[in-house]
Image (cartoon, rainbow, N blue to C red):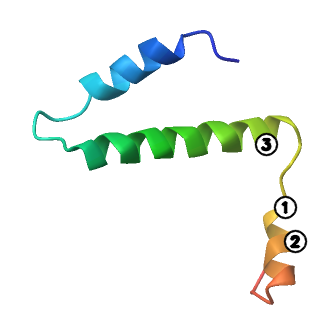
Amino acid sequence: MQTESIKAQAQKLVDNLPDSATWEDVMYRIYVRQAIDAGLIDSDDGRTVDVKEVRKKFGLLT
């Protein structure tokens, strides 16, 4: 799944930040990227729950 090295991906992430970015901005972008990657892996491995099941569990409208 991952063809580009983590170092190259991190460099792109930093390069896309504005010059006024803070360390907090950097950490947030890393966190978001990790969360997305983890979600994609879970999805690929079938570790997801259908939205209808979640709505039913919490008594929400379907």
Instruction: Point out the residue furthest to the bottom here.
Output: 59
Residue type indicated by callout 2: Glu
Residue under circle 2? 53
Q: Nearer the viewer, residue 19 or 1?
A: 19
Q: Quadrant of the C terminus?
A: bottom right
Q: Are marks 2 and 1 in contact (CB under 8 Å)?
A: yes
Residue 60 is drawn in which quadrant?
Answer: bottom right
Q: Is residue 28 above or below residue 55?
A: above
Q: Is residue 62 above or below residue 22?
A: below
Residue 57 is drawn in which quadrant?
Answer: bottom right
Residue under circle 3? 42
Q: Quadrant of the N terminus?
A: top right
Real-space CA distance between mark 3 and mark 2, rounded to the nearest whole angstrom: 17 Å
The label on residue 50 is: 1
Number of the front mark, 3 or 1:
3
Residue drawn at 20 percent across, 44 percent down: 22
Helix, strand or loop under label 3: helix
Q: Is residue 22 left or right of residue 32?
A: left
* Whole-percent x, y for residue 28 in the image: 38, 48
Helix, strand or loop under label 2: helix
Residue type indicated by callout 1: Asp
